[in-house]
Amino acid sequence: MNRLKALHDDVKTSYEHGDYQTATQAYQDWQRMTADDQHLRDDDPKDDYQRGYQRAKQDYQTQHKFQNFSTNLINLVNLLSRNQAIEVSKFIDGYEAYRSEINQES
C-alpha cells in the first residue's frame, strides 16, 4: 500500500510540475490528425492519389515537415497480393508528388 501511495505522490508531483505537457500535446496532435483523416474519408470523394496529395499539403502547412513512407514495402505487398494495397500506393504517390513540388520551390 505504501508503494502505491508513493507512486501516486510521484505522479501527482510530476503532473503539478508540468512534466506531462509533451504527452498531452502529442495526444492532442494525434486526436487532431485522426479527426482530419476521418473528415477526409467521410466528406471527400477524391481518389487516393488526391488524398495523399492533400495530406502532404496539410502536413507541410501545419508541421513544416513530411512523413516518410516505405514505398518499397508497399510495392512488395502489392506484388505479392495482386495489388491488394494499391490504394496505399496511390496515396503515397500523391503524397510524394506534393513533396516534390515543395522541394522544387525550395
Image (spheres, grey):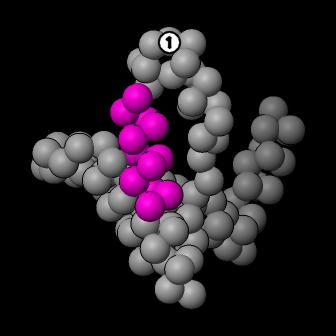
Q: Is residue 37 visible?
A: no
| Residue 89 placement (x, y as % from top left) | 45, 37
Residue flagged by tag 1: what amino acid is it?
Ser
**Residue in view at x 43 percent, y 36 percent:** 88
Which residue is more in the foreground, 92 or 9? 92
Q: Position of residue 100 (x, y in %)?
A: 51, 68
Magenta stretch secondary structure, dominant: helix
Depth order, front residue of 22/96: 96
Q: Quadrant of the C terminus?
A: bottom right
Residue 84 on the magenta span: no
In screen coordinates, is 72 left or right of 59?
right
Question: In the rendered image, which quarter is residue 83 located in?
Answer: top left
Question: Taking the image as drawn, is residue 51 in sight?
Answer: yes
98 vs 20, left or right, is left
Magenta span includes 90: yes
The residues colored magenta run: 86-97
Q: Quadrant of the N terminus?
A: top right
Residue at the spot x=13%, y=45% of the render?
45
Q: Within 10 angstroms of label 1, few (less than 14), some, or many (20 or more) residues?
A: few
Q: Which residue in the structure is indicated by mark 1?
A: 81
Relative to 3, is 103 on the left or the right?
left
Q: How many callouts does the rendering have?
A: 1
- Is 36 left or right of 45, judged from the image as shown? right
Residue 38 image point, x, y percent: 27, 46
* 51 w.r.t. 103: above or below: above
Residue shown at the point (33%, 48%) measured from the top left? 49
**Mark 1, secondary structure of its residue:** loop
Q: Where's residue 96, x and y in %?
A: 50, 58
Would you identify the image quadrant in which residue 16 lies? bottom right
